[in-house]
């Protein structure tokens, strides 16, 4: 402390003085004698003082940086992303900027039932089907040829399968799907439909009811399962296009759209920090204006310098027809007259002109080349697109154009909350898994020793030890099976964790890690993101890495684990 009054804290002499004083104090008061300890302490002090941090304040300064605790509002990173290099940030609207109540999906469900009966002649009993949305979740795959809904792990192994609303037994499931997906591209196989978005929940609920009804009344619905699905999908799409859904939302938006008070601050922050912003949605202008006007009003409305929500974006493209917007480069672009809702054709040569946006910045249709020219992008990887649809928003834009991507996963809130609420259960299951692995290794070693000791007292002792350990191993397997199922059902009664299938990553999780640079539960979570932020992923851990970590692990309370196992044995 005294030396800081006489010597500059960043001088080498001061650093040596700090080092020798610390050395003397440690020799007098501490049992630590390691030269490496003293040398590391010296290097640390020299580094801190070189940074202008006084030794007397260094520990206090380091403690001022709080440890980050994972929350439902975090933005998670799969691929390193430097926001300084991003020139433009775009957003989808439905289920991205705008989140919907279940009453929104119910409009599609009821509308599709009515169309099946009144347009396609299906039995009137269909009108009584209930909308039990909690039976299904996103990330599943619909096998339209067999009438099944399945969940796969990242190896495409089917872990859970339902025929309609009835769960298939393990034997039934393995008979149908054993190793059948190893060389199947689910994106190109017409017999399988990925549930890529929350919109798909309506499809799965209605299709499951139709399967059950067809199986019980084959004479009333003679169509095969795949035709049944296609007709059902046609009716759901009609509801999105003919006003059954959107007219009702326009009448009472507060009944269907969730207000989000962080959307406007998030968009304003991006603009204030110099980023170009755009809205790219498949919805047409009339519906887009309803939704965005509601979000703008509920978010607090305009501030000084704003006339409407349009000022939050540099460009708005509606009716984009994704994924064709991304896959094709010859779709025509139209300018939207927002007052009359009429369209004017845009000549491609106009797009590159500086005054192009002076007349209006709302467009319909077009393709990715128009967007890149309007935003004056140097390359696709200078654009970050935020959306909820795994295929249309994330996978295709990543593969085809090299866009940086951020996936919106509202289910993350429940996933993280459940993990936090049941962390004791999770720890117990993980310890059981670790114990199982140790026992597998140990029993293999015992078998090898028994082979080498053909007879004698030692061989007899080894055989008894092996029998004892095999009893314990079989018990842990049974316990793990029961406890693992309980843990997974805490997330979803039928399908378990969204990002897991059994103890493997789910197919959905594998897609997220492959195609989403970032992912988060809500678009408004980006309000905490600085445009100078560098996102860094957690280290990739191979099985080899994890086993090395596990070999060095210290079981914090193995006694409690053993006590719990013994209690279950007693029961």
Image (cartoon, rainbow, N blue to C red):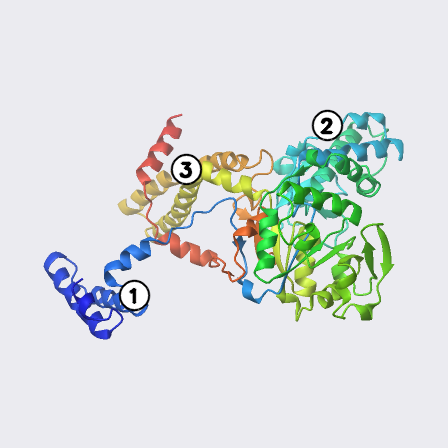
Q: Is residue 225 visible?
A: no
Q: Nearer the viewer, residue 280 or 252?
A: 252
- The image position of residue 379, as x and y in percent, is 66, 69
Q: Secondary structure at mark 1?
A: helix
Q: Nearer the viewer, residue 15 or 399?
A: 15
Cα separation, mark 2 vs mark 3, equals: 36 Å
Write down the residue under mark 2. 130
- Mark 3 crowd level (few <14, some 14–19, many ≥20, 10 Å Cα): few
- Farthest residue in the front direction? 304
Q: Earlier in the sequence, mark 2 or mark 1?
A: 1
Q: Is residue 541 above or below residue 223?
A: below
> Which mark, by number, is residue 424?
3
Q: Secondary structure at mark 3?
A: helix
- In what quadrant of the picture does the C terminus appear? top left
Residue under the point 44% across and 58% down: 544
- Farthest residue in the bottom direction? 12
Q: Is residue 382 above or below residue 231?
A: below
Q: Is residue 251 visible?
A: yes
Write down the residue under mark 1. 48
Residue under the point 58% across and 59% down: 272
Q: Nearer the viewer, mark 1 or mark 3?
A: 1
- The image position of residue 247, as x and y in percent, is 80, 38
In terms of image quadrants, where is residue 372? bottom right
């Amino acid at each position: 402390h005294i030396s800081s009054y006489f010597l500059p804290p960043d001088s080498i002499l001061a650093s040596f003085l700090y080092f020798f004083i610390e050395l003397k104090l440690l020799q007098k008061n501490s049992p630590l004698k390691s030269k490496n300890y003293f040398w590391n302490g010296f290097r640390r002090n020299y580094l801190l003082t070189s940074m202008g941090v006084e030794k007397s304040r260094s520990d206090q300064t380091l403690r001022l940086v709080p440890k980050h605790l994972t929350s439902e509002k975090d933005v998670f990173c799969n691929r390193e992303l430097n926001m300084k290099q991003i020139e433009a940030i775009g957003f989808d609207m439905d289920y991205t900027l705008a989140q919907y109540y279940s009453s929104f999906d119910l409009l599609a469900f009821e509308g599709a039932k009515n169309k099946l009966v009144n347009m396609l002649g299906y039995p009137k009993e269909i009108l009584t089907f209930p909308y039990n949305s909690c039976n299904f979740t996103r990330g599943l795959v619909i096998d339209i040829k067999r009438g099944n809904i399945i969940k796969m792990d990242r190896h495409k192994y089917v872990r859970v399968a339902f025929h309609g609303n009835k769960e298939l037994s393990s034997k039934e499931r393995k008979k149908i799907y054993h190793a059948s997906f190893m060389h199947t591209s689910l994106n190109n196989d017409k017999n399988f439909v990925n549930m890529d978005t929350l919109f798909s929940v309506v499809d799965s609920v209605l299709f499951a009811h139709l399967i059950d009804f067809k199986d019980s009344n084959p004479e009333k619905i003679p169509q095969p399962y795949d035709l049944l699905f296609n007709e059902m999908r046609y009716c759901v799409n009609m509801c999105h296009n003919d006003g059954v859904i959107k007219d009702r939302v326009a009448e009472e938006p507060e009944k269907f759209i969730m207000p989000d008070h962080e959307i406007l601050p998030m968009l304003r922050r991006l603009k204030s920090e110099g980023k170009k912003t755009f809205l790219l949605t498949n919805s047409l202008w009339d519906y887009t204006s309803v939704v965005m006007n509601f979000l703008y009003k509920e978010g607090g409305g305009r501030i000084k310098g704003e006339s409407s929500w349009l000022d939050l974006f540099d460009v708005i493209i509606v009716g984009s027809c994704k994924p064709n917007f991304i896959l094709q480069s010859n779709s025509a672009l139209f300018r939207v007259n927002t007052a009359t809702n009429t369209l004017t054709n845009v000549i491609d040569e106009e797009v590159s002109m500086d005054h192009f946006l002076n007349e209006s910045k709302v467009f319909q249709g077009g393709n990715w080349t128009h967007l890149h020219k309007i935003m004056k992008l140097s390359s696709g990887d200078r654009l970050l697109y935020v959306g909820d649809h795994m295929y249309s928003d994330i996978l295709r834009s990543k593969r085809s154009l090299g866009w940086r991507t951020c996936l919106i996963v509202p289910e993350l809130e429940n996933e993280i909350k459940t993990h936090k609420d049941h962390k004791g259960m999770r720890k117990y299951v993980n310890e059981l898994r670790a114990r199982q692995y140790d026992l597998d290794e140990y029993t293999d070693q015992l078998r090898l020793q028994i082979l080498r000791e053909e007879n004698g007292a030692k061989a007899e002792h080894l055989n008894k030890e092996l029998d004892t350990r095999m009893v314990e191993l079989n018990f842990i397997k049974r316990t793990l099976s029961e406890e693992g199922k309980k843990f997974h059902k805490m997330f979803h009664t039928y399908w378990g964790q969204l990002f897991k299938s059994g103890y493997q990553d789910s197919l959905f999780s594998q897609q997220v890690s492959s195609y989403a640079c970032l992912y988060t539960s809500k678009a408004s979570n980006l309000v905490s993101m600085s445009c100078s932020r560098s996102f860094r992923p957690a280290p990739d851990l191979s099985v080899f890495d994890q086993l090395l970590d596990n070999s060095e692990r210290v079981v914090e309370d193995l006694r409690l684990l053993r006590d719990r196992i013994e209690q279950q044995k007693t029961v």
